[in-house]
Amino acid sequence: MTETLDLLFTGVPDLTNTGPDLAFAGPAFSLSAFQGAEKLPSFSFQTPVTVTIRYTDADVAGLDEGRLRLIYLDGASWVDAACGPYVRNPAANTLRVPICHLSEFGLYQWEFRVFLPLVVRPAI
């Protein structure tokens, strides 16, 4: 027996409270699953489903497109949503990524910062 599953895509203006290590790169969205009128809150795919993210040059201005990641909040921290390899096409401003579950997602770049200790030496 086959049942119909409806996926609802909802745009999200921006995912907030991501922390200082992430730079927002444009699209943020929520994916939800429904069977009829019933929402399936903890739905997971049996096999990965590939989503294609389209972004603009303005979305990624100042960012490295090779470091973009689709992320989601796992309850405690922001983690990479991919359950397989990314396919990047910077010339077409697209990123293809396999996902295994539904959530709120956002396109971000992890920022790496280096903090050096301050050393003060008295003048001799």
Image (tube, helix red, strand yellow):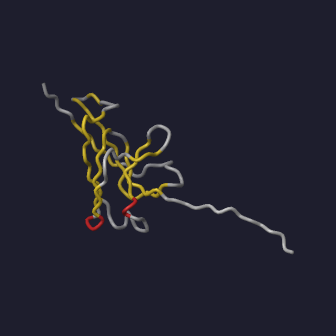
Residue 63, relative to residue 87: is it above or below? below
Asked where in the image residue 95 lies, by quadrant, the reply is: bottom left
Of all residues shown, which one is farthest toward the right?
A: 124
Instruction: Please state the horizontal and vertical placement of residue 79, each as a whole percent of the image.
Output: 43, 45
Task: Report the label total.
Answer: 0
Instruction: Please state the horizontal and vertical placement of residue 104, each as a whole percent of the image.
Output: 37, 43
Residue depicted at x 77% and y 67%:
120
Asked where in the image residue 39 lies, by quadrant, the reply is: top left
The answer to whether 98 appears left or right of 122 in the picture is left
Asked where in the image residue 2 lies, by quadrant, the reply is: top left
Instruction: Please state the horizontal and vertical placement of residue 31, each as a whole percent of the image.
Output: 31, 42
Of all residues shown, which one is farthest toward the front?
A: 124
Residue depicted at x 38% and y 54%:
69
Front residue (pair 85, 111)? 85
The answer to whether 6 appears left or right of 40 in the picture is left
Instruction: Please state the horizontal and vertical placement of residue 63, each as a whole percent of the image.
Output: 42, 65
